[in-house]
Amino acid sequence: MSLSQTSLGRAGLPRWLIERVWGLEHAFERARASGKAEDDTRLRIFFVLILFAVGFVALAFGATRAALFPDAAHVGGAGAPLGASRTDLVDRNGMLLAADLLHYGLYIDPREIWDQAETRRGLKAALPSLDMNRLERALRGNRRIFVAGALTPEARNRVHRLGLPGVTFEPEQRRIYPLGTTAAHFIGFSDAGGEGLSGSEAALNDDIRTAARSGAPVPLSIDLRVQGALEDELYKAIHEFRPVGAVGLVTDIQTGEILALSSWPVFDPNAPGKSSVYAQTNRAAASVFEMGSTFKAFTVAIGLDAGVATPESTFDAREPYKLGYRTIHDYHASRKILTLVEVFQHSSNIGTAKLGQAVGPERMGHYFDALGLTKAAKVELIENARPLTPRVWNDDAVASTSFGHGINVSPLALARAMGAIHNGGRMIPLTIHKLEPGTKVDGPRVMSERTSLQMLSIMRANVTGGSGKSADIPGLSVGGKTGTGEKYDPAIRRYNGQKQVSSFAAVFPTWGGVDTKRYFVLILLDEPKGTARSAGYSTGGWVAAPAVGRVIERIAPFVDVQRRADVGQAVPVLPPTVEELGEAR
């Protein structure tokens, strides 16, 4: 075999084709050898005609296939677009939250248009929402130009059936959020190039893009059933009390999973550019607030864990507490000596400040650090605000922060710290990932298990006989703490009593040991307005606690918490042991 034949063989051509080509070449050589040049010429012309015919047939077949099956070139073996860059997002039960879908971009080349009026009429009828100004610019131009994007296959087919010359399409991927505004701040959105910009889309960007190669969805921690109940009750409270902003949260205290997150105002991730930055802000993660008396849960827990108080310890709240240049008052003065449990039930600033002074600045600062209240919440979300904390931990700072004044934290940071004082004292991160059932999540211990059990009892006592009564749900053993913090008003350079952040932080169920499955629920309203039904009040007990109770009642079946007939008043509060008192920090 000649060198040329060897090269052809190595090129991978079929043997029969090689034999035919060389057979034809030998025919040319025989024609020349016999002196019949005209036969040689005819053979060569015939050969060229065959090549042209084969090429023409191949092109015709490709054009026909593209016209009849326009999506065929863009579809892989599994039916998914080859250009898909992001996989589906689903909730913990597999319900779709976000997906890449094939759409089309509309292009116009005015040089190929025969009748501009016909083109204008046809496109306007097929695409009523088409930007007519952009269409006119395209028709008057001198080159092919993009006119509209994100056309669905149905819209593309409507235009395609018109058979308009100069009107063409190009496939493009578009991220779709089928639930619209539902869980929008948690899910987030991505840009046209397939990069996540906010929420889970940004936090898990690499995971989402990597999973697209296999087509497997990425499950998130939220439960759409819980999310729906939370949003519904939050929006009812918003409608009634007309705040400027609001937050709703549900977390699994044992695993740190965020089961529901709502921030208001809302936006549509399908068209984020149509909403303001204010609406796109995730207030649960990216905003910080003075949480008011919800912080008394931390102060009481710290006092118990440090061994400076027991549930039976007493605090004189008969007169305002004078500390240096300031005087601390109670919102509803009881003017009596209170036990620690009563301090919590009456939400006494005086009693809590005195407890904070007994703990001291150094230990209070240490506990606040350990509870994550002096740093951004540990969670995957990139919208994660750092808190505003005292510059120096002195007596004044301790007195203020003991009842949630002078420290601003995000709702997520509050949720994480609340989880630690109710899950047995373990500081675990929050997560937007779905964890496998039975997963054990651990973290550094910040409090004793005994302190955690005591706090569950004290939180329950506050709902059965304290400021959280309106959140009590029969059979579910709800515990919680109200919070009402005045907002600093730059216009008057001081705190404005007419502008408040009102909230209720709850845990349920409070029965069982430290390993019992428990859930944290928070409703926060920013600057709510009192109504006739709330007797003009806009405090946490009036505007947030009832909504939390309704949320808990609705979500209990979804998180497998069954009502119990034996749930009544608070369980006995455990006093610290002698050993624990000896280990006080």
Image (tube, helix red, strand yellow):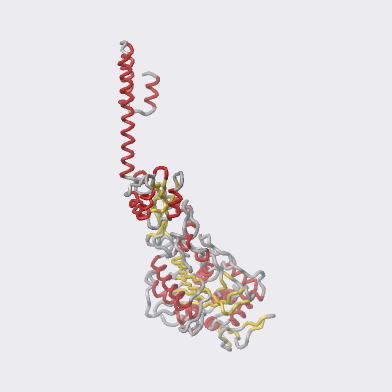
Task: Pinpoint residue 483: horizontal percent, then vertical percent.
Answer: 53, 77
Is residue 135 among what the camera can see? Answer: yes
Residue 1 lies in what quarter of the image?
A: top left
x then y, percent, for residue 289:
56, 71
Residue occupying the point 48% across, 82% down: 531
Q: Quadrant of residue 330?
A: bottom right
Towards the viewer: 533 or 226 = 533
The relative height of residue 399 versus residue 153 in the rendered view (above or below) is below
Residue lying furthest right: 325
Q: Is residue 442 left or right of residue 49?
A: right
- Horizontal side of 168 relative to 480 (left or right) equals left
Of residues 218 and 356, the one drawn nearer to the viewer in this rendering: 218
Marker count (numbered): 0
Vertical relation: 133 (above or below) 457: above
Nearer to us in this view, 378 or 130: 130
Q: Position of residue 243 (x, y in %)?
A: 50, 74
What residue is drawn where x is 39% and y is 28%? 11
**Res. 401 in view:** no
Q: Which image quadrant: the C terminus? A: bottom right
Which is nearer the eye, 308 or 542?
Answer: 542
Q: Is residue 49 left or right of residue 237?
A: left
Q: Position of residue 197 (x, y in %)?
A: 50, 57
